[in-house]
Image (tube, grey):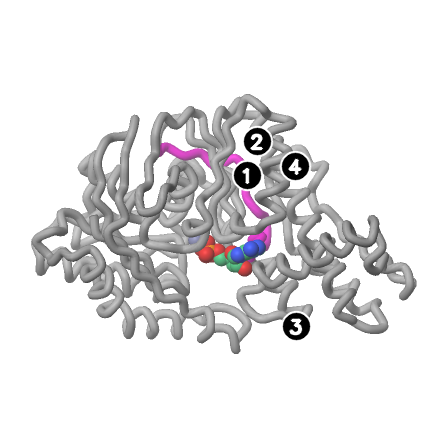
Amino acid sequence: MLAIETSCDETAVAILDCAGDEKRATFEIRGDALLSQAKIHQEYGGVVPMLAKREHQKNLPHILKTALTQAEISEEGVEVIAVTAGPGLEPALWVGINFAKALALAWGKPLVAVNHMEGHILAALARCEGKLLEIQGVRLPVVALLISGGHTELVLMREWLKYELVGQTRDDAVGEAFDKVARMLGLPYPGGPEISKLAERHRSARSRLGTGSEGSGEQSGVAIKLPRPMLDSNTCDFSFAGLKTAVLYLLKELPELTEEKKRHIAHEFENAAADVLWAKTKRALAQTGAKTLVIGGGVSANTHIRRVFTENSAREFPEVLLSIPHASLTGDNAVMIGIAGYYHALNKEFADFETLAANGNLSLAQSSTKPRR
Ligand code: KG4
Ligand code: ZN
């Protein structure tokens, strides 16, 4: 399986040796080449779609060459080509899709169109040992919390690879909120890992000095306390725009933004985000009787969120199996596209060369009619 991912600011090609079926499948990573454009977009404070497109166009051929060289195969060794069809930035998606179409036509190979979010779910379900991944005996139903720069949604998989939307953000995605708050604090893009670093520093200073000792926030007369939006609403929907705006107002009130204050705000913001994510996931678990919980997407790399989910699910839902992606598979990558592509190839769900198109809003949940924001 040769897999291509260009939905956002990572250009990635992976080559996987796949075997098995939905009961047990194994994926050996033979080639995995990835180039992040983060540095290029940094000066704009976020991903610029046309720049992303240009960089994918520039880099995809040599990323393919690197992956083929790593795997020590040529085109004869490739059986199927998988490519991300959406969701994501359409100009960026088109680069991968056209490249995949050209390869598939020239080499005479079938093509599979993959939903990027399904890739995140399957990557989270994979057990990972070095270059060998395995997905085995998944207990349905699965609830998946998908948290990335463009998405915050709770998805239910009752039947294998069939999805229903249980909840979603009504405004910003949680990763977007991390990135915007980071920007307000003067931190570089992508902001998620930066906020996480500051928040962890605040936590360790607090535990070293005793709770609340590192800047209680009261010296300036401004309490560093943020809301937990929609915590009490009886839906599984989220809202992060208000949380982001609350940070903006808090910053306006502060006479001075010291490094200590930055750490404190990052800490409170991360706590608020994690609290809301857990509360809504908990509601979804109770509502659906899920046997497995997965979290996936770039924000699932967050140390605090991983900790909150690990501790709370063990305590409150001991019967539910929590599956968190291996650190190497949290962000965008082509391995997850290859995994999803394999299952669809097994079902002979091949894409039509004529009609395959990028879809920036491609939805996972077929039954859903709600628009994504
Ligand atoms: O899944 P992903 O790589 O790309 C999209 O499909 O959007 O997710 C990117 C998002 C960004 O918003 C980034 O700030 C966030 O994931 N992120 C994090 C962390 N690492 C990446 N957010 C919080 N904590 C992190 N450690
Ligand atoms: Zn993603």
Q: Amino acid at mark 3?
A: Gly
> What whole-number distance in Å separates the C-alpha atoms at marks 2 and 4?
9 Å
- Tag 2 near tag 1, CB within 8 Å: yes
Secondary structure of the residue carrying tag 4 is helix
Q: Earlier in the sequence, mark 3 or mark 2?
A: 3
Q: Residue at x 65, y 56 (%)?
A: 241
Q: CA distance from mark 2 to mark 1?
A: 8 Å
Disc 4 from disc 3: Cα separation: 29 Å
Residue 167 inside the magenta-drawn segment: yes
Tell whether 260 sits left or right of 198. right
Name the front one of labels 2 and 1. Answer: 2
Cα separation, mark 4 vs mark 1, equals: 12 Å
| Circle nearer the viewer, 4 or 3 | 3
Span highlighted in magenta in the image: 161-175
Q: Quadrant of residue 142?
A: top left
Circle on res. 186? 3
Q: Which mark is residue 279?
A: 4
Residue indicated by mark 1: 167
Q: Tell us which disc is closer to us: 4 or 1.
A: 4
